[in-house]
Image (tube, rainbow, N blue to C red):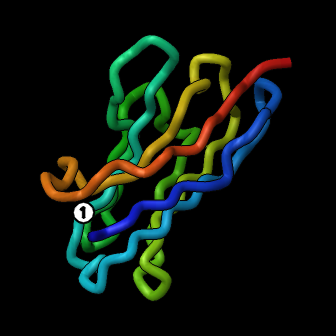
Amino acid sequence: QVQLVESGGGLAQPGGSLRLSCTVSSRIFNLYPMAWYHQAPGKERELVASINSDSIANYVDSVKGRFTISRDNGNTAVNLQMNNLKPEDTGVYFCNTNPPHPSWSWGQGTQVTVGS
């Protein structure tokens, strides 16, 4: 069973930065398009950034220019650098494939709280 373990969340002030990491226990991690998903309080989980196997990244408009997704195939990890954080970035962040893998369970996520 593949495990997804997210880390790096915390409390940040508006305009601050956080770096999230997700390790994936898959031997063929390098073949998967990966993504970060954001679940704001009381809302559905939504994709915010994705990266394919060729490391081509895409972002939703709300995070363009502020977030950067990257992958480290050697360490089977996908990262999310979050800059210029806004209160609306608050929520739990998860990683998974893009689209979410039908056989993988979601990880516990990592909580990001943006506030002064």
Looking at this view, is 9 or 87 the one in front? 9
Q: Residue at x 82, y 28 (%)?
A: 13
Query: Residue lying farthest right?
Result: 116
**The N terminus lies in quadrant:** bottom left
Question: Where is residue 101, by image quadrant?
Answer: bottom left
Compared with residue 68, is residue 62 higher up or lower down, i.e. above or below? above
Left or right of 74: which side holds 96? Answer: left
Looking at this view, is 86 or 65 the one in front? 86
Where does residue 29 sit, x and y in percent of width and height? 30, 77
Query: Residue lying farthest front?
Result: 1
Looking at this view, is 16 or 20 the one in front? 20
As helix, strand or loop, the secondary structure at mark 1 comes to loop
Where does residue 103 sit, x and y in percent of width and height? 16, 58
**What residue does disc 1 label?**
33
Q: Amino acid at mark 1?
A: Pro
Where does residue 55 sit, x and y in percent of width and height? 34, 69
